[in-house]
Image (cartoon, rainbow, N blue to C red):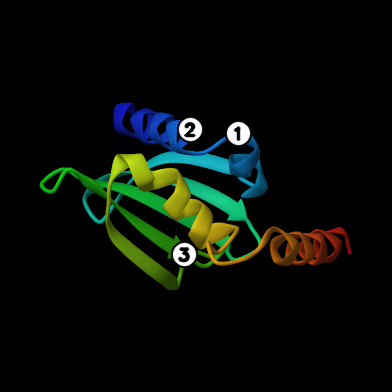
Amino acid sequence: MRVANEINRQIRCGVTMSVQMSWGVSKRIATIYENRATLALRVSGVLHKGWVYISLDEGRDCYVITLLSPDKKKVVSVRDEVYCEELGSVIDNLVERKEEWTDEEYEKLAMADSDQKMK
């Protein structure tokens, strides 16, 4: 639980609350994944809908981010060697918004995603 709280704190240090809210987090769970202390987030972002597992790799003093399908049966993507200062922005780039998108591109995609969720 202590590690999950620290992960959550480090995410908050790297991105604004509005960015975090754009991920559509509906659950936050402290768990163990692949023998590592992990914070699991259920998200509904523009780029990814499902689970984000943020696991502490104590040996390398960094994080492993694993994207899982909504049913947790399929690993969608894995990003390792993520350091605390980049944690929030890496999650945002995986879940909500690619870095190379302009504001206009993102706004258009976000509105379409929002409309789809309302149906």
Q: Position of residue 45 (x, y in %)?
A: 64, 57
Quickly name the residue at label 3.
68
Q: Position of residue 57 (x, y in %)?
A: 20, 48
Q: Quadrant of the C terminus?
A: bottom right
Badge 2 vs badge 1, beta-carbon distance below 8 Å: yes
Identify residue type, mark 2. Answer: Arg
Identify residue type, mark 1. Answer: Met
Name which quarter of the figure residue 100 lies in: bottom right
Mark 3 falls on what kind of element? strand
Q: Residue at x 23, y 46 (%)?
A: 62
Q: Position of residue 74 (x, y in %)?
A: 45, 73
Q: Earlier in the sequence, mark 3 or mark 2?
A: 2
Identify residue type, mark 3. Answer: Leu
Which of 42/116 is in front? 116
Q: How many marks?
A: 3
Name which quarter of the figure residue 113 lies in: bottom right
Question: Which callout, 3 or 1, points to the residue nearer the camera?
Answer: 1
Within 10 Å of the Cα at label 1, are there few (<14), some (14-19), or many (20+) other Cα atoms? few
Mark 2 falls on what kind of element? helix
Q: Is residue 118 above or below residue 22?
A: below
Quickly name the residue at label 1.
17
Q: Earlier in the sequence, mark 2 or mark 1?
A: 2
Q: Position of residue 54 (x, y in %)?
A: 37, 49
Quickly name the residue at label 2.
12
Q: Is residue 99 above or below residue 55?
A: below
Q: Residue at x 36, y 56 (%)?
A: 65
Query: Alpha-carbon distance for marks 3 and 2?
Result: 22 Å
Query: Alpha-carbon distance for marks 2 and 1?
Result: 7 Å
